Amino acid sequence: MAIKLIDEKLKSLQLFEGTLFGDERGFFMESYRQDELARYGLKENFVQDNHSGSVKNTLRGLHFQWNKPQGKLIRVSKGEAMFVEVDIREQSRTFGKYEKFILSEANRHILWVPPGFANGFLVLSEWCEVQYKCTAYYNPDGEGGILWNDPELGIDWGCSNPIISERDRKAMTLRDWLAKPESKIFT
C-alpha cells in the first residue's frame, strides 16, 4: 500500500500518509494513486494541479470557490506549513468549526479538503512549497475568502503579524458570507 488513511476530521477532511521508499540514492513516493484513495471513498476527478512557494510567516487564505466548487488534495513538497480548514457548509453539524493540520516534506501527509471548506495555511519553515490537485478549474468569478482572523472563528494561527495579501486582508467574515445567496450552494 503506497497511501494510507491516518486521520479523518469533521466527517469529511481526510489525512493520508504516503509510503516512502528510500535507499542511498534518495527516495521515491507515490503522492497520488487513484485506486488506493478510492478505497477510502475518494473517487474524485482532478482537473488542475497548482504549486505555490512562500516564505516563512506567509498566510494564504481562507479561500474557497463557490461557483464550480473545488475539492483539493494537498501536500507540502518542501518545508512545512500549518493548514486550517473551516467548514462553511451551513447545514453541516460541524458548520463554523475548523481543524488544523501540519503538512511537511518530512511527514509526507496528504490532505483531502472537499468542497464546502475554506482553506488556508501559514508557512512555518523558511521556505515552503505546496502542491495540490483540484476537482474543478479555477474560476475567478466564483472565488471567495473568509477573513483569516475572523473573531467569531477564533483561529489561533500562532503568528500575530503574518505576511498576507491585500485580498486576504479584505476578506469577509463567515457571518458576512452567510448573508450572501451564494452561500446556499454548500447546504
Image (cartoon, grey):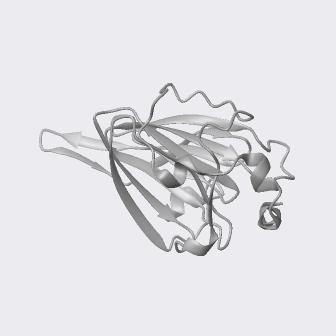
Above or below 28: residue 182? below
- Residue 91: image location, x then y, percent: 87, 53
For the view shown, which residue lies furthest in the left direction? 25
Residue 79 position by quadrant: top left
Residue at point 52%, 70% (across, down): 46
Residue, x 60% and y 67% (percent of image)? 44
Is residue 108 something that shows in the picture?
yes
> Left or right: 162 with respect to 15?
left
Q: Is residue 138 above or below residue 24?
A: below
Horizontal arrangement in the rendering, residue 106 relative to residue 48 (left or right): left
Residue drawn at 62 percent across, 44 percent down: 85
In x, y percent, where is residue 181?
A: 82, 66
Whether residue 33 is visible to the viewer of this picture, yes or no, is no
Considering depth in this image, is 179 or 105 the residue closer to the camera?
Answer: 179
Q: Residue at x 74, y 38 (%)?
A: 97
Look at the picture and state if 137 lies above or below 176: below
Query: Residue 82: x, y in percent?
Result: 48, 35
Q: Nearer the viewer, residue 5 or 73?
A: 73
Residue 135: give x, y in percent of width and height: 56, 69
Direction from residue 77 to residue 37 in the image, left or right: right
In the displayed structure, does residue 81 sit left or right of residue 85? left
The total of numbered circles placed on residues is: 0
Q: Nearer the viewer, residue 90 or 43?
A: 90
Q: Nearer the viewer, residue 161 or 63?
A: 161
Q: In the picture, which quadrant includes the C terminus?
A: bottom right
